[in-house]
Each structure stands twice: as C-alpha cells, then as structure tokens.
Amino acid sequence: MKRLILVICSISLNMVGCLILLCGCSSIMTHVGPHQGYYSGTKADTRILKDSDTGWVIKPLAMIDLPFSALLDTVLLPYDYFQADNIAPQPSPKERVQDWENYQATDITYQTTSK
C-alpha cells in the first residue's frame, strides 16, 4: 500500500514538474532571442491561435500556454523595459540575406571589371 502511494505521488510530482516547465514556453522562447517588444510570448500565442495554417495539435497547446505566457510576460515586464533602451534594432533575416546577396553581386562585378 505504501509503495502504491509512493508511485502515485511520484507520478503526480512528475506531471506537475512537466506542467511547470511547459508553462509560458512561448514567453521563454521569445525572451531567449533578440528583443521583440512587450508581451512577446502572449503575442506569439495569439498569432498561433489566429493563424489558419497552424496544425490542430498546436492550437490547444497554445491555448493552454496563453495565460501562463501572459503571467510570465508580466513578471518579465521590467526586464523588457530595460532591454528596450539598451538594444538597437536588428535587421530582419530577409534584409540580412538581401544585403549579403547585394554584396556578393557587387563583389562579382568588381572582380570581372578589374581583370
């Protein structure tokens, strides 16, 4: 009997631990990368819920994650406030690729005209 109670408690604690680790995952993911503004995890969850191309598996997970991401974004609001002043805006990946392609094109043009 004691072993059964121990197993049930262990499973319950593992489930609670997994829920705690998964709560607010959109907020955590958006705060790991470059600064994306205030309430970035909440915005990411709402984009997932509004997107018609999102799969049926992801939408319920985003719905469960939304209140936890909102809570975590609220806790991280002072951090976002101080980050907004310290970080210069980064160009988008598309702009970086276009700049690299333009550089490659001018480099090839320079090499062909200098020969």
Image: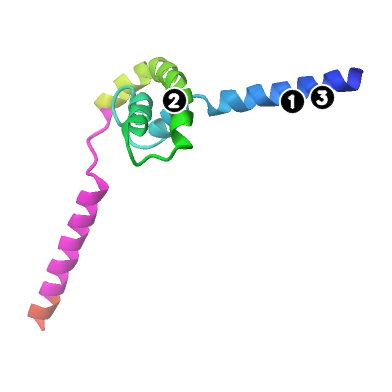
Residue at x 38% of width, y 39% of height = 54
Of the image marks 2 and 3, the number of the one nearer the N terminus: 3
* Residue 27 lies within the magenta run: no
In the image, the segment drawn in magenta is 86-110
Q: Mark 1 or mark 2, which is nearer to you?
A: 2
Q: CA distance from mark 1 to mark 3?
A: 6 Å
Residue at x 42% of width, y 40% of height = 55
Q: Amino acid at mark 3?
A: Val
Mostly what secondary structure, the magenta segment? helix
Q: Where does the image place residue 92, in percent across and percent down from the top left?
A: 24, 44
Q: What residue sits right under mark 2 in the picture?
A: 63
Query: Is residue 25 at least partly visible in the picture?
Result: no
Q: Quadrant of residue 44?
A: top left
Q: What residue sits right under mark 3 in the picture?
A: 7
Q: Amino acid at mark 1?
A: Ile
Q: Quadrant of residue 20?
A: top right
- In the displayed structure, does residue 102 sit left or right of residue 49? left
Vertical relation: 83 (above or below) 96: above
27 or 50: nearer the viewer:
50
* Residue 105 lies within the magenta run: yes
Q: Where does the image place residue 9, in percent across and percent down from the top left?
A: 77, 19
Q: Residue furthest left?
A: 113
Q: What residue sits right under mark 1 in the picture?
A: 11
For label 3, the SS is helix
29 or 100: nearer the viewer:
29
Of the image marks 1 and 2, the number of the one nearer the N terminus: 1
Q: CA distance from mark 1 to mark 2?
A: 24 Å
